[in-house]
Amino acid sequence: MRRPAQAALLLSIVALVPAAAAPPALYAPGRYQVDSVATRVHFHVKALVGGYEGDFVAPEGAVVIDPAQPDRATVDISFPVERLTTGDASTDAMLKGDSFFDMAKFPTIRFIAQNAPLARSDAPTPIAGELTMHGQTRPVTLSVRLVGTTLKEASGPDEAPGLSTMHFSGAMTVERSQFGMGFGRPFVSDKVDLSIDAIFSRAQL
């Protein structure tokens, strides 16, 4: 008769364990503004001799997690072509000119994803979206990994205490000819490798 009594006691103890013992959710619903200073996309293009590489910086946009669909997000991020930098002024001018990005006509690069899955830290998460570049919009898939989430104190009137930040890394490869930028082939590769380091902060809770 002891074993049933012991089993009943064990079940009662388990039932009393507070729900707070469960692992906390990685994400909370809200609007997460991109950190325009810390976020950048690094690009690398192979060439017959050497190659080209540089960064897209100073983005605008946000990731929005809807409380009605907390396991999905909307992503809308834009990078100004004007802020493209390779560390060499003549290369920057060439890339911003009409043979490549044609900044005067197409001043921004934009990535949009609807109903995107939330990235995990243990494995890359594929996020399907649309990339607009040089006036052309094409479907792309971005591979994203969650680097981490943190809490920080409010630093201004538009932020709330306990403001959370999200840090992501990501990668994808695009063919520039699909965006009307085939100049220089085959001496310069058609494939452009992109690596992303992005931080977002929740501006409103």
Image (cartoon, rainbow, N blue to C red):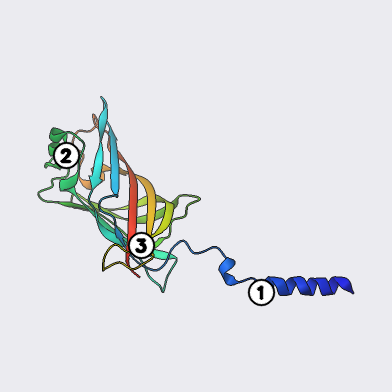
Seen in the picture, residue 32 relative to 96 is either above or below; the reply is: below
> x and y percent of residue 24 in the render?
51, 64
Q: Which residue lies under the disc numbered 1?
A: 16
Q: Nearer the viewer, mark 2 or mark 3?
A: 3
> x and y percent of residue 192 in the render?
29, 40
Q: CA distance from mark 2 to mark 1?
A: 64 Å
Identify residue type, mark 3.
Glu
Seen in the picture, residue 30 relative to 52 is either above or below; the reply is: below
Is 72 positioned to the left or the right of 101 in the image? right
Seen in the picture, residue 158 relative to 152 is either above or below; the reply is: below
> x and y percent of residue 167 in the render?
38, 53
Q: CA distance from mark 2 to mark 3?
A: 40 Å
Q: Secondary structure at mark 1?
A: helix
Identify residue type, mark 2.
Leu
Q: Earlier in the sequence, mark 3 or mark 1?
A: 1
Q: Residue at x 13, y 37 (%)?
A: 94
Q: Earlier in the sequence, mark 2 or mark 3?
A: 2
Identify residue type, mark 1.
Leu
Q: Residues within 10 Å of mark 2 (few under 14, many from 20)?
A: some
Q: Residue at x 18, y 46 (%)?
A: 83
